[in-house]
Amino acid sequence: MSGSPVNSNILSFEDARRLVEMQAALVRESGDSATEAVELLAAAGRVLAEQVVADRDLPPFARSTRDGYAVRAADLSRLPATLDVIGEIRAGEILEKIPSNVDAGQAVSIMTGAPVPSGADAVVMVEYSSERGNQVEITRGVAVGENIVARGAEAREGALLFEPGTRLNAASVAVAASVGKVRLKVYKRPRVAVLTTGDEIVDVGVMPGPTQIRNSNSYSLATQIEKAGGEAVLLPIAPDELPPLRRLIEEGLKGDLLLMTGGVSMGRYDLVEQALAELQAEFFFTGAKIQPGRPVVFGKCGGDGREVYFFGLPGNPVSTMVTFELFARPVLEALAGQTPRKLQFLHARLKKEIRVKTGLKRFLPAMLTGEFENSEVELVSWQGSGDIAATARANCYLVIPDDRERIAAGEFVAVMKGDC
Ligand code: AMP
Ligand code: MG
């Protein structure tokens, strides 16, 4: 028997992606992901499951952003101006040592991060001053409010800083620290079953026979899964035979998401769709008009009394990586409790002309170089979607629209920063 018993449903990239995003949104709405508390230091990369609220005004006092002199701006309308220095305020200064008021004609020496005393309405930088005895001569004027961040200007006490669903990066961990969150409630990482299929595939530790190939897809996928917030669970390699394949798929459906690689093309022994059909799977699509990755399959299937999403990713190693980024990632992120994100692209000038056939949207391994407004990108030379070594030399995917036969050197093209 050739091909698969499943009705073919091949979508444009945009339709396939929309469908994935819709399912991801449904997952998020259901909101039944389990949570746990983690130490702040372990929270980076995790997804918040609680609101984070400012426990005090940020900053908690009017803060000087410079080393210099707290003054009344009006005193510097004529320059140079000579003011009486009535004290010094260090960062963290105790309240009792802060002058109660700064009057006209007075200045207070102040450090970055120190509270601005009342009466002063600006800070002039130390670079524009020279202190002589108890006086300071200032050679540059300031606007009211200059070099001061007002109390509560960054956030008011009680203000909502983060909603549940926020992926914590370095800045958001820092914000959580600044409002005293020693621990944070986060969503548990979804368990993602990885099932590699293929009679020719052997595990990394096994010496391959002359016609065998080492399993690399499970490892690229595990890396991508961990980065996207999941926990990869590697299943044994499935042969291209229905009964054991079906059994391993059932095993994989015990996880929160099942990713399979290989066995979704048109070959006689590409049996993944058939095995899924036998398990009463529902298929959202059975292909997308992209390269690499055209045979990608997305659906859901009952397992353990619940429905589990699955992706059948093509076995070619670059196809596996690209289709994970384009389609599996949003579903995984949603299962991880994260609010789904749009794909992010940047633009760069094409270094060398590209000629391709129309009809497929292409995501090809490429090298982005240059800096600031002079970014350039060029394809890395490769042997097709099995060439993982070429992808390892790349640092992005260059996106070629499906209706372009030729893109001239110098044109701006879209570039996707994937995990390549
Ligand atoms: P398939 O999608 O099963 O037709 O496989 C397409 C190509 O990818 C074949 O050349 C396979 O040998 C290769 N391949 C499939 N699975 C893996 C894997 N886990 N690691 C490395 N190569 C693979
Ligand atoms: Mg295969």
Image: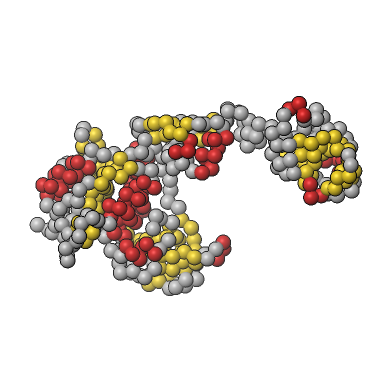
Left or right placement of residue 72 versus residue 363 in this view: right
Residue at the extreme left: 1
The quadrant of the picture occupied by the N terminus is: bottom left
Residue 389 or residue 283, whichever sits in front:
389
Q: Camera-side residue: 305 or 14?
A: 305
Q: Quadrant of residue 408?
A: bottom left
Residue 35 appears in the figure:
yes
Q: Residue at x 47, y 68 (%)?
A: 350
Front residue of 188/202: it is: 202
In the image, taking residue 243 as reference, residue 353 lies left or right, namely: right
For the C terminus, which image quadrant?
A: bottom left
**Which residue is most to the top?**
96
In percent of width and height, residue 187 lies at 39, 35
Q: How many numbered discs sit on the rendered protein?
A: 0
Across and down, in percent, residue 108 comes to 81, 37
| Residue 51 vertical placement versus 272 (above, below) | above
Q: Position of residue 378 (x, y in %)?
A: 44, 68
Identify whether 216 is placed above or below 337. Answer: below
Give residue 355's quadrant in the image: bottom left
Residue for point 13% across, 47% down: 244
Residue 28 appears in the figure:
no
Q: Which residue is found at the position 38% from the left and 43% from the top?
A: 229
Query: Which colouring convention does the figure follow?
Result: secondary structure
Report the residue at 39% width, 37% height from top.
337
**Could you say where residue 242 lies in the image, as x and y percent from the top left?**
12, 49
